[in-house]
Image (cartoon, grey):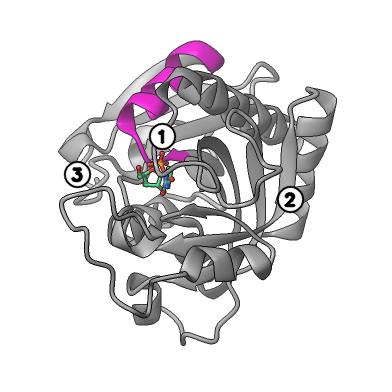
Amino acid sequence: MTSNRLYHIGFGQDDLGSQPPSIALLSGDPERARLIAESYLQDVRLLSENRGLNSYLGYLPNNRPILSATSGMGAPSLSIVVNELVQVGIRQIIRIGTCGSIQPYITVGSVVISSAALCRQGAANDIAPVEYPAAADPFLTVALVNAARKLEISHYVGITASVDTFYEGQERTDSANPYLMRSLDGITEEYRRLNVLNYEMECGTLFKIAGVYQFAAAAVCGVVAQRTKSENVILEQKDTAVKNAIAVAVHAAETFV
Ligand SMILES: O=P(O)(O)O[C@H]1O[C@H](CO)[C@@H](O)[C@H]1O
Ligand SMILES: O=c1cc[nH]c(=O)[nH]1
């Protein structure tokens, strides 16, 4: 490992070889980052497992170099990882996540491609004003949509609600905290009426950071919960949802120029 390694991600630009990648697939879950590296990339090299932020360097089938990296859960962790990925030369980031649908027609196992985010996230306020748009890169987003079409994966494109908590912030009451503040009681139905598609916890901050740092960011999330029916994650269909999101992102990364 080289001396210019970044404090959190645990590797530096010098570790990326003579043909360094400009694109990264960014998963919340380190096991997803590992799965992508081991099952979808070639000539894979583990760069770091520092703090569980697993990062791998590999190659797409068309020989394009790519990183499979881990953001951790939530916007504060993502903000640190993204800052350091940009420092090592990354210019395009595709978030591959999981999410909960809040529209009755978006079923578990399908994927949501975020065109923009309603960003209710504290970390983003350290980077840009609250009014600053949280918009995905249109070109990278079109690449995701084209990939989903080509692979015939059920997909929906629209606005994602990115919030800081999985339980209270997503209006869950079947947890250690049955009490919801009045400001959150009914928020899911309000978002549903505003045509928000899904809940997750990173896109909004990722998109705002991309606007400020001037790199391209997009996101595809597998639907693992259907919040118009239940608060629960449907574990039996999680693998399908995640595989669909990965397939879309990997195909988009290959075709995006
Ligand atoms: O599956 P990941 O990418 O972690 O994404 C979602 O899952 C976590 C919550 O379970 C949050 O990070 C949320 O955004
Ligand atoms: O409901 C869900 C499922 C995954 N991730 C979330 O943030 N919410």
Q: Earlier in the sequence, mark 3 or mark 1?
A: 3
Nearest the eye: 214 or 204: 204
Report x, y in % for residue 197. 63, 55
Query: Closer to the camera: disc 3 or disc 2?
Result: 2
Report x, y in % for residue 126. 34, 80
Q: Looking at the rendered structure, which numbered label has been put on residue 178?
A: none
Based on the picture, tell me whether residue 32 belongs to the magenta stretch.
yes
Name the secondary structure under disc 2.
strand
The quadrant of the image that shows the N terminus is top left
Query: Closer to the camera: disc 3 or disc 1?
Result: 1
Q: Amino acid at mark 1?
A: Val
Mark 3 → mark 2, Cα distance in angstroms: 42 Å
Q: Please state the total of marks drawn on the protein image.
A: 3
Q: What residue would you read off at disc 2?
A: 157
**Magenta-colored segment: predominant secondary structure:** helix
Q: Is residue 129 left or right of residue 133?
A: left
How would you rate the neighbour count of disc 2 (Cα within 10 Å): few for under 14, some for 14-19, many for 20 or more?
A: some
**Residue drawn at the location 44% of the way across and 13% of the way down:** 38
**Residue drawn at the location 59% of the way across and 28% of the way down:** 109
Q: What residue would you read off at disc 3?
A: 3
Q: Is mark 1 within 8 Å of ligand 2?
A: yes
Q: Amino acid at mark 2?
A: Val
Q: Which residues are magenta?
A: 26-40
Name the secondary structure under disc 3.
loop
Q: Earlier in the sequence, mark 1 or mark 2?
A: 2
Q: Earlier in the sequence, mark 3 or mark 2?
A: 3
Q: Looking at the rendered structure, which numbered label has been put on residue 233?
A: 1
Cβ–Cβ under 8 Å for marks 3 and 1: no
User: Please, is residue 240 above or below residue 189 in the view?
Assistant: above
Name the secondary structure under disc 1.
loop
